[in-house]
Image (cartoon, helix red, strand yellow):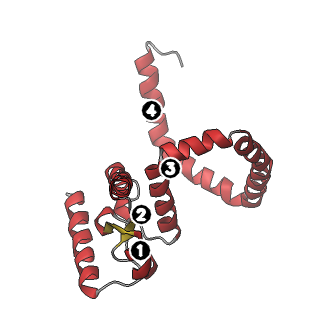
Amino acid sequence: MPYKCKEEKAAYQKAYYEANKEKSKASMKAYYEANKEKKLAYMKAYQKANKEKKKAYRKANKEKIKAYREANREKMASFNARRRALKRKQIPVHLRDCPHEKKRLVEIYKLRNIISEATGVQHHVDHMWPIADGGPHWSGNLQIIPAEENLSKRASVCEETKATIIKSLYTFESERSI
């Protein structure tokens, strides 16, 4: 079908896409369900093939990787804490993809580094309500305390602190949804 201009063609394509979107999703889902084993086998082969490449890259670029991690310590610490929390499913759903929350977490880890350097005493970022006890990985649940105090605290939390964090998280969530 000949089009008079690019806009006309784009409008036709968009309308066609919208009209067939659900049909396309259903056929893709059916394809993946029918070929699940094939897809898994392909992914395993791909990961196995690239495992050696990744290993070789890390070996050849040890210093570069070390320099990056050293220059971005707070990002690495934030990433590792997020990874542990994701494994335990302790990140509130409404904060999982929030760029502001991610920035707040990185800033907390930066502040921890600054305090540790300024005082000469090692400090940790601590979950007031520990993740191990079901607490959320959220900036409102974090505090910076000396490492010695954090290690002696273990997974203890008072019920009042737990209730305050739940209330704050609920308030924060309802404010974000407005």
Circle 2 — which element? loop
**Rendering coords of residue 102 (x, y %):** 37, 53
Discs 2, 3 touching: Cβ within 8 Å:
no
> Which image quadrant is residue 128 in?
bottom left
Taking the spot 48% from the left edge, 16% from the top edge, the residue there is 3
Taking the spot 52% from the left edge, 15% from the top edge, the residue there is 2
Rate crowding at label 3 as few (under 14), some (14 to 19) or many (20 or more) other CA atoms within 10 Å. few
Q: How many angstroms separate mark 4 from mark 2 (CA)?
A: 57 Å
Label 2 belongs to which residue? Answer: 122
Lower sequence index among marks 4 and 3: 4
Report the side of 82 relative to 55 (left or right): left
Discs 4, 2 touching: Cβ within 8 Å:
no
Label 3 belongs to which residue? Answer: 22
Label 4 belongs to which residue? Answer: 14
Label 1 belongs to which residue? Answer: 148
Q: Nearer the viewer, mark 2 or mark 3?
A: 2
- Residue 78 lies, with reference to residue 15, above or below; the image says below
Q: Quadrant of the N terminus?
A: top right
Q: How many angstroms separate mark 4 from mark 1 (CA)?
A: 60 Å
Discs 2, 1 touching: Cβ within 8 Å:
yes
